[in-house]
Image (spheres, rainbow, N blue to C red):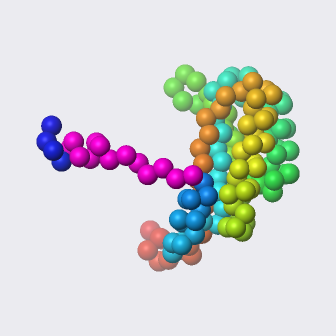
Amino acid sequence: MNSENEASEDVAPVVMDLREAVAHYADTEYPPIGYMLRYTFGEPKVLPESHPLWEQMKLIAVGRGLKLNRRVLAFQDQSFAQYEMTWEGDLKILADSAEATTKLVEECMERMELRPSMTFGFVGPQHEPSEDDVF
């Protein structure tokens, strides 16, 4: 292994807490306009829409002003239920909103004894399509 490869392997990713990340990206050319939370469940019992999880996620979404999408994904020999919640609003309250929503979902998951994986991401501004986007 050469020293260039060794150096690249030693570089640790930058870790920021949510408030630091919001402050960091607020000063960029395209600050976030919202956030996305995606919960992925591998438990087969949550696949049917009749499972109480669907109703609970809808209640959380309505109560927190979030858009909610549900999908079932098949991968190899397993299926996954995925719930994606998006919020758009004032950057000043983005971190508070994300933390409050996450807390509600975590409490719900604990009650239902579910252990989803969670992905967080910022929602960026949509750009107007240009002639370069058309093919």
Q: Residue at x 66, y 39 (%)?
A: 39
Query: Is 8 a magenta residue?
Result: yes
Q: Residue at x 57, y 75 (%)?
A: 128
Asked where in the image residue 54 lies, by quadrant, the reply is top right
Answer above or below: position of 4 versus 27: above
- Depth check, front residue: 44 or 94: 94
Asked where in the image residue 9 lies, by quadrant, the reply is top left
Query: Is 79 a magenta residue?
Result: no
Q: How many marks overall?
A: 0
- Depth check, front residue: 56 or 131: 56
x%, y% of residue 100?
76, 49
The span picked out in magenta is 5-17
Can residue 5 be seen in this snapshot?
A: yes
Point out the residue furthest to the left here: 2
Q: Residue at x 47, y 70 (%)?
A: 133
x%, y% of residue 132?
43, 74
